[in-house]
């Protein structure tokens, strides 16, 4: 770049102190004034906008994922109901077996009493 400047521009545009010639300085200021500048805003609004954008993106979920989750929850509910029904059936079977054992115990006690066998 320095070589191009030395070749493309003569030394008449440079002052003795190494600065820019005052006649070119006004032109450069005009060019620089037309260039867009980046203004620094405080980081708080940017941070708030970034957090809001991330929250928005995180809240956007796929309908397919929602349908899959709903199906899994439905299947879980069905399995839970089946487990409850099985537990109720097992409890009824246990109660029935207790009744049978109690009747058999009563019968054996009566038979032992008739036979004269001490308990």
Image (cartoon, rainbow, N blue to C red):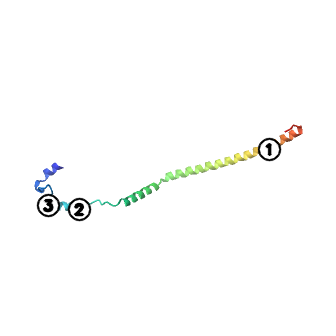
Which of disc 1 and disc 3 is earlier in sequence?
A: 3
Per the image, the residue denoted by label 3 is 22
Front: mark 2 or 1: 1
Front: mark 2 or 3: 3
Residue visible at 17% across and 49% down in the picture: 2
Which of disc 1 and disc 2 is earlier in sequence?
A: 2
Residue visible at 68% across and 47% down in the picture: 87
Residue visible at 11% across and 54% down in the picture: 11
Other-residue count near label 1 (Cα within 10 Å), few / some / many at <14 / 14–19 / ≥20: few
Spatial CA distance of label 2 from label 3 is 19 Å
Which quadrant of the figure has residue 47?
Answer: bottom left
> Residue 65: horizontal and vertical position, in percent?
50, 51
Which of disc 3 and disc 2 is earlier in sequence?
A: 3
> Residue 90: horizontal and vertical position, in percent?
70, 45
Report whether 60 appears left or right of 13: right
Residue visible at 62% across and 49% down in the picture: 80
The reply to whether callout 2 and callout 1 are in contact (CB within 8 Å) is: no
Per the image, the residue denoted by label 2 is 34
Spatial CA distance of label 2 from label 1 is 103 Å
Question: Please, what secondary structure does the residue beneath circle 1 have?
Answer: helix
Other-residue count near label 2 (Cα within 10 Å), few / some / many at <14 / 14–19 / ≥20: few
Spatial CA distance of label 3 from label 1 is 118 Å
Q: Is residue 16 above or below residue 110?
A: below
In the picture, the disc for residue 102 is: 1
Report whether 8 appears left or right of 57: left
> Residue 9: horizontal and vertical position, in percent?
13, 53
Question: Please, what secondary structure does the residue beneath circle 3 have?
Answer: helix
The reply to whether callout 2 and callout 3 are in contact (CB within 8 Å) is: no
């Amino acid at each position: 770049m320095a070589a191009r400047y030395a070749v493309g521009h003569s030394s008449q545009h440079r002052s003795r102190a190494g600065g820019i010639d005052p006649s070119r300085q006004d032109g450069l200021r005009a060019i620089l004034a037309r260039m867009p500048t980046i203004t620094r805003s405080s980081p708080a609004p940017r941070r708030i906008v970034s957090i809001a954008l991330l929250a928005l993106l995180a809240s956007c979920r796929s309908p397919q994922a929602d349908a899959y989750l709903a199906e899994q929850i439905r299947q879980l509910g069905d399995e839970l109901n089946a487990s409850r029904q099985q537990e109720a059936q097992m409890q009824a079977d246990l109660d029935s077996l207790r009744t049978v054992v109690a009747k058999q115990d009563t019968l054996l006690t009566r038979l032992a009493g008739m036979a004269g066998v001490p308990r």
